[in-house]
Amino acid sequence: MVPAGLIYYPDNRPGITRMRHGRGFTYKGADGTTIARGPERARLEAMAIPPAYERVWMTPKDNGHLLATGYDARARKQYRYHPDWSEARSQTKYSELAGFGRLLPTIRRRVARDLNEEPGEREFALAATLALIDKLALRVGNPTYAEENGSYGAVTLTRRHLRLKDGEMQIAFTAKGGKRARRRVTDKRLMKALAQARDLPGAELITWVDDDGTPHGVTSQGLNAYLAEAAGRDGVTAKVFRTWTGTLAAFRTVLDGEGHTIKALCDAAADRLQNTPAIARKSYIHPAVIGLAGVERPKLPKPDRLPGLAAGEGALLAFLDRQ
């Protein structure tokens, strides 16, 4: 749904292009005419699109949902959205979080069932990957990031990232942003699955093998399709786990009863997600949970007793249901 006052105008429609001109830029309309100094030129320059971006497209509509697109130095497409569109998308993400929490037991039952499949089966690989994200709060991962930046996520981890020592299992890797991450695996079902996956062919930690004996890594598209099927609802993606996990980490700080400042909430989420407190607050903590910061003895509803939820999840779900 497009917020009031905006129109949906994607970058496959006619737009304004930015071209280098001397030490600066010139802007050309869809009809090829140069946009002279004036209000329209000021609007385009106010977007502050990084100078390094190439093949820049800019919307001719001042109320377009998408302001501009371009390609960075690594040839990755970047998007600049209207603030009202970004705000609406953010609110939608959080408004659906309680629904995701209610689906978690169903998703986890499917994962537990598929972890009993034969190692090498596609369902086994998908379930093991989703369990990594659920239990260890890992990002999904991106092959391009792994190749170019040496940073890893659930679908790009390799065997060298899995460590076994003195009966303890750990995953140690470089996360997004170059931060070193170390996760201890304590869930016995996941430990068994990773030990089995380690013996399969292929470069990735978790692979599946087709009928011809060819190993395949799990893709983010395949993982999201599996998750949607497990949840019984389209649109559920692995990224929602990150929002749930960050919100839960912050909420548990509130449940602890003391010192639940905004800083403490954001620090807890950032530590769990392996990112910065600023990013955790902006993208991964439900605003209603942030609103509990500093409130002495907040009145919280009775925890939801839904089977399959971990400690604190039932209380979080009951709280979100009231928002």
Image: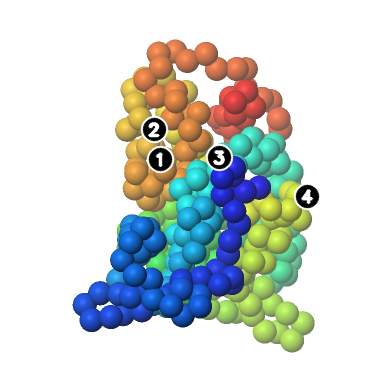
Earlier-in-chain disc, 2 versus 4: 4
| Quadrant in the picture for the C terminus | top right
> Circle 1 — which element?
helix
Earlier-in-chain disc, 4 versus 1: 4
| Mark closer to the observer (3, 2) | 3
Q: Residue at x 71, y 32 (%)?
A: 307
| Mark closer to the observer (1, 3) | 3
Q: Hey, which quadrant is residue 114 in on the image?
A: bottom right
Earlier-in-chain disc, 3 versus 2: 3
Within-10-Å neighbours for mark 4: few <14, some 14–19, many 20+: few
The residues tagged by marks 4 and 1 sit, at their Cα atoms, a distance apart of: 29 Å
| Mark closer to the observer (1, 2) | 1
Residue at image mark 2:
265
> Circle 2 — which element?
helix
Quick check: 76 left or right of 6? Answer: left
Residue at image mark 3:
91
Q: Are marks 1 and 2 in contact (CB under 8 Å)?
A: yes
Picture layout, residue 225 above or below residue 183: below
Residue at image mark 1:
281
Q: Residue at x 39, y 51 (%)?
A: 274
Within-10-Å neighbours for mark 3: few <14, some 14–19, many 20+: few
- Residue 68 at x, y = what percent? 46, 64
Q: Are marks 2 and 4 in contact (CB under 8 Å)?
A: no
Amino acid identity at mark 1? Arg
- Residue 13 at x, y = what percent? 59, 70
Q: Hey, which quadrant is residue 48 in on the image?
A: bottom left
Quick check: 161 left or right of 202? Answer: left
Earlier-in-chain disc, 1 versus 3: 3
The residues tagged by marks 3 and 2 sit, at their Cα atoms, a distance apart of: 19 Å
Q: Residue at x 38, y 47 (%)?
A: 279
Residue at image mark 4:
232
